[in-house]
Amino acid sequence: MSNETRNKKIADAIQRELSEIIRLGLRDPRVTMVTITDVELKRDNSHAKIFFTSLGGDTKVQSCQQGLQSAAGFLRTQLAGRLTIRTVPDLHFAIDNSVERGVNLAKLIDEALADDAKHPE
């Protein structure tokens, strides 16, 4: 199995397990309604960038990110007990804005189509 395939499997396992740990084991009131959307691992598995989305405004999402980052040690310890890898990567959390960008693009397309329909040629 190539290293790239192995890293993808590890990233998928981290995403699955982190979602479960956050849902059931994390008691930080700042971390609510979180969805882990992607995990990017460094080649040597020393660091993992965790992308997440959360409901609420920018202030709520920033607060959620701070809560997740402050719980990174706890989450890493929980992952160590669930995964069968030698070293668990350091966790770094990043806000995933792709859903918001997708909604904005869809809105722009709808507006362009509506404008196009007003001016038939």
Image (cartoon, grey):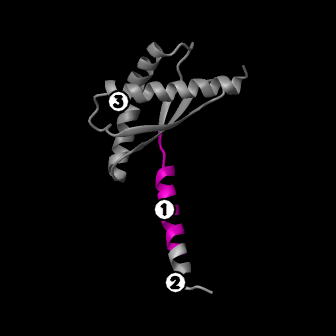
Q: Local crowd at mark 3 within 10 Å, few (<14), some, or many (≥20)? A: some
87 or 35: which is nearer to us?
A: 35
Q: Are marks 3 and 2 in contact (CB under 8 Å)?
A: no
Q: Position of residue 77 (x, y in %)?
A: 42, 18
Q: Local crowd at mark 2 within 10 Å, few (<14), some, or many (≥20)? A: few
Secondary structure type for disc 3: helix
Q: Nearer the viewer, mark 3 or mark 2?
A: 2
Q: Is residue 4 above or below residue 51?
A: above
Q: Is residue 37 above or below residue 73?
A: below
Q: Is residue 86 above or below residue 15?
A: above
Secondary structure type for disc 1: helix
Secondary structure type for disc 2: helix
C-alpha span from label 3 to label 1: 29 Å
Q: Position of residue 5 (x, y in %)?
A: 68, 26
* Figure quadrant of residue 71: top left
Residue name at image x 52 percent, y 84 percent: 118
* Figure quadrant of residue 18: top left
Q: Which residue is disc 2 drawn over?
A: 118
Q: Which residue is disc 3 drawn over?
A: 23
Residue name at image x 50 percent, y 69 percent: 110
- Along the polypeptide, which appears first: circle 1 or circle 2? 1
Magenta stretch contains residue 109: yes
Q: Which residue is disc 1 drawn over?
A: 104
C-alpha span from label 1 to label 2: 21 Å
The residues colored magenta run 94-112
Residue 46 visible, this angle: no
Q: Amino acid at mark 3?
A: Arg
